[in-house]
Image (cartoon, rainbow, N blue to C red):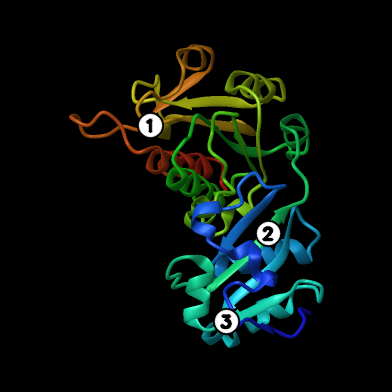
Amino acid sequence: MAGAPIRIADADDPRIAAFRAIRERDLVGREGRFVAEGTVVLRMLAASHAAGGRFRAETVLVLENRLAGIAAILDSLPADVPVHVADRAVFNAIAGFDMHRGVVAIGRREAVPAAGALIASLPADSLVLAACGISNHDNMGSLFRNAAAFGVDAILLDETCCDPLYRKAIRVSVGAVLSVPFTREGSAQNMLEALAGAGFDIWALSPRGEAAIGSIVPARRLALVAGTEGEGLPAAILSRFHTARIPQKPGLDSLNVATASGVALYQMALAKGRIG
């Protein structure tokens, strides 16, 4: 159980230094730390911490009128995780803007699995999402939210993708970044070759794909590959693996990558009997 809340009356209090001006600093890349914002995200962070998962809560800051509503979540945190409470004026001064959610934590990623180790850990019947060059944090968060909704076992990101632990990506994912196993490293080509070597049937999304996504006969191990907006997936990937398209009305080049991944993962999960 977390300790008694610590009242913060001064935005310059050194005990809450990690929260100061988080909009600009955001903590990405700082020794695995990240900002978890909102009740749902805090609940998922606390669940990971309690279960000895990949993520830990280091410290929490709560708007005073939100404290009672999240008491059960705070009680699930260990006693060595400090919980700070402040009124709205002090809270806003700490964060650097008016954060209406009123719940924010600093988390830390404990372990970063290598792509090979993550692939090796997957079950015999698996659904994987791989992504190449995703640079928009809203899209990244949506990819994780879609993956969680449709039972994806892991997400593999190449080194050119943005960090899913960026504050906005976590928020858009509604905490799914903290629940769906992922790794981010190396080239997309090497990542996909490793999946192929592990027996995955790989389908790359493209507006000009060879097969309609709904016609795919699912393998026990199935991977969907999504690319960046505009450029899409590299030609080397499209020529090496199966390609799939989402049929749509003529006149529009393609769907947003987040929307496209949601449609495609829905079809794959349905075909594999994971939903429905």
Q: Is residue 255 left or right of residue 200?
A: left
The location of residue 243, given as percent across then percent down, is 45, 21
Mark 2 element type: strand
- Identify residue type, mark 1: Glu
The location of residue 205, given as percent across then percent down, is 44, 28
Point 52% across, 67% down: residue: 95
Point 65% across, 83% down: residue: 71
Residue behind mark 3:
86
Near mark 2 (Cα within 10 A), the count class, few <14, some 14-19 or many ≥20, is many
Residue behind mark 2:
107
- Identify residue type, mark 2: Gly
Q: Is residue 149 visible?
A: no
Q: Is residue 274 left or right of residue 51?
A: left
Residue behind mark 1:
229
Upstream in sequence: badge 1 or badge 2? 2
Near mark 3 (Cα within 10 A), the count class, few <14, some 14-19 or many ≥20, is many
